[in-house]
Image (cartoon, helix red, strand yellow):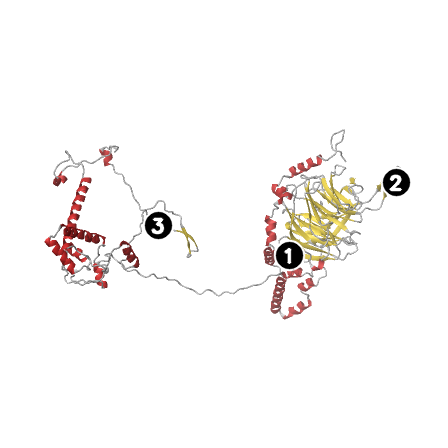
Amino acid sequence: MSSLKVPGQAKGAAVPKTNSRPSLTTIKSMIRSRSKMSQLAAESRSRLRQSSRVNFGGDGGGDDGEEWLQAKDPVKPDDQLELTEEELKQEFTRILRGENPNAPDNIVRFSHKEHSYQKLATVEQCEIHFALDGQLVHQDSDEARRFRARRNIRKPKAETAETGTGTEEDGGEADGDAEKEADGEDGAEDEGVAEGDAEAEADGEGDGAEAEADAEPEEEEEEVVEEPKVLRNQFNFSERASQTFNYTTKERHVATEPPPRSNFKGSCTQWEIYDLYVAEKARQDALKEKKKPAHEEKAHVQETPAFDRSSSSTEGDASLWAASAKVVSLEGAKKVERMVNQNSFDDVLQDFKYWDDVSDEIKPDEGSLLPLWTFLPLDGIKKKHVTALMFNPGYPDMFTVGYGSYNFAKQKGGAISCLSLKNPSHPEYTFTTESGVMCLDFHPEATNLMVVGFYDGSVAVYDMHSKTLSTPIYKATALTGKHSDPVWQVKWQPDDLEKHKNFYSVSSDGRITSWTLRYSELHHHDVIRLSSQVASGGEGGGAAEESAPSSGTCFAFNATSEHLFLVGTEEGKVHKCSKAYSSKFLSTFDAHHMAVYACAWNKYHPRVFATCSADWGLKIWDHSYPKCLFEFDLGNPVGDVTWSPYSATIFAAVTTDSRVHIFDLSISKYEPICVQPIVKKGRLTHVEFNPIHPIIIVGDDRGSAIALKLSPNLRKELKKKTEPEAQVEKLEKILDSVKELDIQTGKPIAG
């Protein structure tokens, strides 16, 4: 009979057994499978022996048991290099290092301890060439159960015995491979079926029964191959390796309490600085009072303190800053104030240092002006005209402004303020005068001496080093020969033969007077008297007849020829005069139709000068040529004109419509290259170039002084620093191109 399985038997269900021994059919199938496995192993060993056998000497035959006694011929490739014995004995040493040549050596990491980026001392040298993730899973996990379900693999019997799905009592009776195969058989077969199969095999009934018996072991053999190999002691596994104790990491750090902090805020203004000065002065006076003896206190009470005298002075020391400057004589106080102002005007300082107009690259023949600072007058001198403006020759950042009035019906008083580009918020010092200031000038060598001309016709000399600035060291009065009309311009001259300092002045009374500083007095003498007409004597030798005196408005002294100077008059004429001749003029130019406001010599060319007038005209002259070389109509009265200190072809002028006109004869001979309005309301009165920096200062009739920076097209020559000879040659070529030539000689017409 063939063996049959019980239908409907669940896999892994418990089946009662009466005998624990394996059946005869199972034993036969195990024997057959072992014989097949041994046969396959013998065939594989023989194939391996043939494939790995080396070509032995002789005909390749011989006893296999004596292979180790036979000589072996090595197999050489055909292209192998033949080496000599010396070459074979030569040794080549190679040092193999466990370093990765492609590993970077410049990796940095931020160190919180050092608060900076630090270079790594060690770099990982390990290079992984192959990596494969394993596929082992725990057999009790859900993933293992799903894997067995997909492959239709049953659990080992040893595991089912523990989970209660079967029974196994003979723990070690059977040994060898037969016991392992018997333990792995399914325990669900019926006992009666197994006995019937054994009887059928023993009796040998029929060929069909034998065929069925042969098919059953094959089926059992396939099931055995599918089952996984059971690992013994899998739940009591311990790895045979040295395991050291890992110490727990410890961090040692010290936490200190942060120091206490407090936020302090405060404002540093000019009045607070002044209040601190006054408080400090009062404290120092109190300490001095305590230290003084009793007999000195009475004398001190009778005297008036210097601070009260300066603060109650009627000559202009009533300003707060003038009083505080006298109280505090420390140089550090001014430095602190300048530092505060530098922070307040930081954006303006950046423009002063680095600003360049980008549009100059697009328009190379035009320029522009950038307003920087506006210096406003103090409360006591507001609404006064800026009548004088000049930079100090010893300090390029310092300039002095004179305040007066061009409205002759409203004359009250004047003032003088010294301003600095380093402190645009407040003047360095300011003092008032009894009469309006009309002009001023600094000595080129003794920069502390300043001469001032007043509206009442007097002139005065001030010493900037004096503690009492408001008191002049020299002053002309009616007894010492002052002018009877306003003094329009003053100018220092070189020292005379006796080394006495002297200066010139021009006034509306027609006198050009020379003043000499001798000891404590001003000595004067009239160099020339201006007149509208001078009639010479007749044939009979009669006396000269003089007409009414002419009014002088301005003058200018030549830098190379000290004796030569120009005088402008209210009639519009310009006289060329000499210090050596007091009775007549060298020549006269019919320059303008109205009063000449200013005339200025070129700072490079000794023959060229410029004049401006109330007739809206601005003209360029050569004193050796009788006609005007260049004439410009600016459309409004021209208040002032000045030449550039760094170029012979650039000059600037201001008009009463609050516009600044800058000309460059090398670019345009007919129109200015820059015309820019400065103020909305008011008229510009004076303009002055800074001797070093590319800025100009303009003054208006409201008491304000405005600093303007020149664009790159207006200061090209400042960067080049051309030699004076080249500047003269450049201007001479421009002048020759406009001069009229004499028909007979072919030379310019001489005056």
| Residue denoted by label 3 | 124
Q: Which residue type does callout 2 highlight?
A: Gly
Q: Position of residue 447 (x, y in %)?
A: 66, 50
Between residues 137 and 124, which one lies in front from this camera angle? 137
Q: Nearer the viewer, mark 3 or mark 2?
A: 3
Between residues 261 and 190, which one lies in front from this camera angle? 190
Tell me the SS state at disc 1: loop
Q: Residue at x 21, y 52 (%)?
A: 222
Residue extending farthest left: 203
Between residues 82 and 654, which one lies in front from this camera angle? 82
How many other residues sit within 10 Å of disc 1, few (<14), some (14-19) or many (≥20)? some
Residue 289 sits above or below residue 487 on the image? below
**Any mark on residue 132, and which?**
none
Q: Quadrant of residue 545?
A: top right
Q: Position of residue 78 (x, y in %)?
A: 24, 32
Q: Position of residue 79 (x, y in %)?
A: 26, 32
Q: Nearer the viewer, mark 2 or mark 1?
A: 1
| Residue denoted by label 1 | 425
Residue extending farthest bottom: 294
Q: Which residue type does callout 1 highlight?
A: Ser
| Residue denoted by label 2 | 542
Marks 1 and 3, the one that precedes in the sequence: 3
